[in-house]
Amino acid sequence: MVQADRFVREAVDEIAAEAGHHRVVIALSGGVDSSVCAALASRAIGDRLIPIYVDTGLMRKGETDRIARMFGHLNLRIIHAEDEFISALAGITDPEKKRKVIGERFIRVFEREARKTGALFLLQGTIYPDRIESEGGIKSHHNVGGMPVEIEFEKVIEPIRDLYKDEVREVAGALGLPPEIQHRMPFPGPGLAVRIVGEVTREKLEVVREANWIVEEELVDRYLPWQCFAAILGLGTGVKGDNRVHGWIVSVRAVNSRDGMTADPIEIPYDVLGIVASRITSEIPSVARVVYDITPKPPATIEYE
Ligand code: XMP
């Protein structure tokens, strides 16, 4: 790729030119893509940048506090929209419909905030694989295919639209962002909703959020994976005490990848998997079963929906 330093200079100039004298809203998620965009835009337009973090209720455990800590210096607005997202998802089981609903809500929340601030432009951290997967009809990324046609912003600026993830990480380094952000695992725009097969409910969200936390605690430092997480597959039978009970089936996934387009499962020894499974079933009593997913991409995707 072009040199990271040069990319930074050019992207800052491009954002400054595109934004003109306008205020710009950015969807800050705390991942490497949106953090890089916020840092570039902050250099380009200073406090005319209005970063907004939406707590969709679909985020990882502790995420909102973490974002507040890391980006508080940037005039960050934290929007609590958990109820709005979770009600909008009620009863929806089709994966594409879930993505569309989340994408649409997202944009609406931004429009609402932008109206309050007078911002006419939206800046997004869309990267190259997001665009080609959406254009190819594989799935609609919430930040691409799910965007309602009648968007109220005058302009959408996408400064890292031509970069792959590893290139974004290089740019993060060139910008001096902390390693915690630079090396953070990707997290999908629709959040934990794509780690719940079928309808999203508050109960399933709590379970998957806690299971994800455990998986990250046990596997991130050990394997430095491209991604590791937990997903809920459905209900199954288990035994608690003397009784057969219904409990959630949780799948653990840990993969390595270069750009998310293909991926290989990590060969995790049984004893480590055993620790993960026993922590999940004991710390989350409603889980009856834990499985480890050994499918590469293709044929499977990384996420479950
Ligand atoms: P899949 O599941 O398609 O995921 O193999 C490939 C990579 O993309 C991430 N992903 C998303 N990222 N919006 C995003 O911003 C989305 O809708 C989305 N869906 C998947 C996924 O976590 C993996 O890194």
Image (spheres, rainbow, N blue to C red):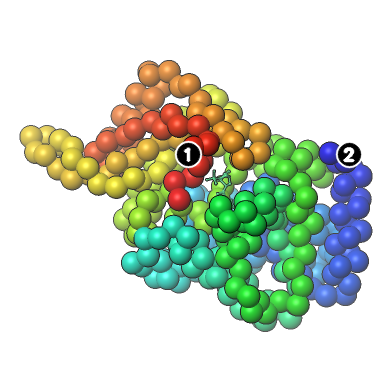
Find disc 1 in the rendering and name its residue.
300
Where does label 2 land, which residue?
A: 3
The reply to whether the residue tagged 2 has its Cβ within 8 angstroms of ligand 1 is no
Q: Residues within 10 Å of mark 2 (few under 14, many from 20)?
A: few
Task: Give the answer, above or below, for where 272 lies relative to 238.
Answer: above
| Amino acid at pointer 2 | Gln
Q: What's the mark number on residue 188?
A: none
Q: x, y percentage for residue 154?
A: 76, 77
Report helix, strand or loop for mark 2.
Answer: loop
User: Compared to 276, does 121 lie above or below?
Assistant: below
* Mark 1 beta carbon near ligand 1 (under 8 Å): yes
Toward which corner of the image does residue 294 lie, by quadrant? top left
Horizontal side of 244 relative to 12 (left or right) equals: left
Q: Quadrant of residue 221?
A: top right
Q: Position of residue 120 (x, y in %)?
A: 75, 77
State yes or no: discs 1 and 2 in contact (Cβ < 8 Å).
no
Q: Amino acid at mark 1?
A: Ala
Q: CA distance from mark 1 to mark 2?
A: 34 Å
Q: Going by the picture, which residue comes out furthest to the front?
A: 136
Q: Residues within 10 Å of mark 1 (few under 14, many from 20)?
A: few
Front position in the image: 206 or 235: 235
